[in-house]
Image (tube, grey):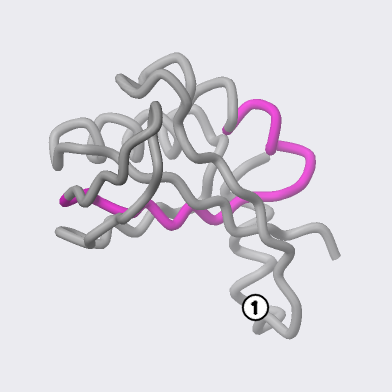
Amino acid sequence: MNEIIVLTTTDSIELAHKIASALVEKREAACVNIIPEIRSVYRWEGKICDEKEFLLVIKSTVQRLEAVKDRVRSLHTYQTPEVISIPVSGGDPAYLSWLHASVE
């Protein structure tokens, strides 16, 4: 199978909604969950940052990954947005069928 979960974070709920809506509207993702107010601790430009962010959990396929990455980068405000793809295993067949139909 070729289903994936793509993760990215944003610094605002508005941007999270904008990216999620665009991905689903353009059929680049079947569904996007927005998890509000996570904390991210990371190193950026030599200093440790601790920021409130919003996590997007994007359900898509390997075939749509480049489109997802391009869309996220084109809408994102971060210089280097996180875009990480994780393969799906053991998914419910009916759900995975719906996922594929939603991105075709």
Q: Position of residue 96 (x, y in %)?
A: 67, 69
Considering every residue shown, the one lying at the far front of the view is 46
Kind of residue indicated by mark 1: Ala
Q: Is residue 72 or residue 53 the one in the foreground? A: 53
Does residue 97 sit above or below 100 in this rendering?
below
Considering every residue shown, the one lying at the far top of the view is 74
Find numbered disc 1 in the image and state the secondary structure of the residue it sits on: helix
Query: What's the residue at 59%, 58% (across, down)?
Result: 5
Q: Quadrant of the N terminus?
A: bottom right
Tell me which corner region of the image, top left, top right, bottom left or bottom right, holds residue 68. Answer: top right
Q: Which residues are magenta?
A: 52-68
Q: Quadrant of the C terminus?
A: top right
Residue 53 among magenta residues? yes
Q: Position of residue 55 (x, y in %)?
A: 32, 54
Does residue 59 sit above or below 29 in this rendering?
below
Query: What's the residue at 50%, 23% (across, down)?
Result: 71
Query: What's the residue at 77%, 46% (across, down)?
Result: 62
Residue identifier under label 1: 94
Query: What's the residue at 74%, 85% (across, down)?
Result: 90
Residue 31 among magenta residues? no
Q: Is residue 75 or residue 102 the one in the foreground? A: 75
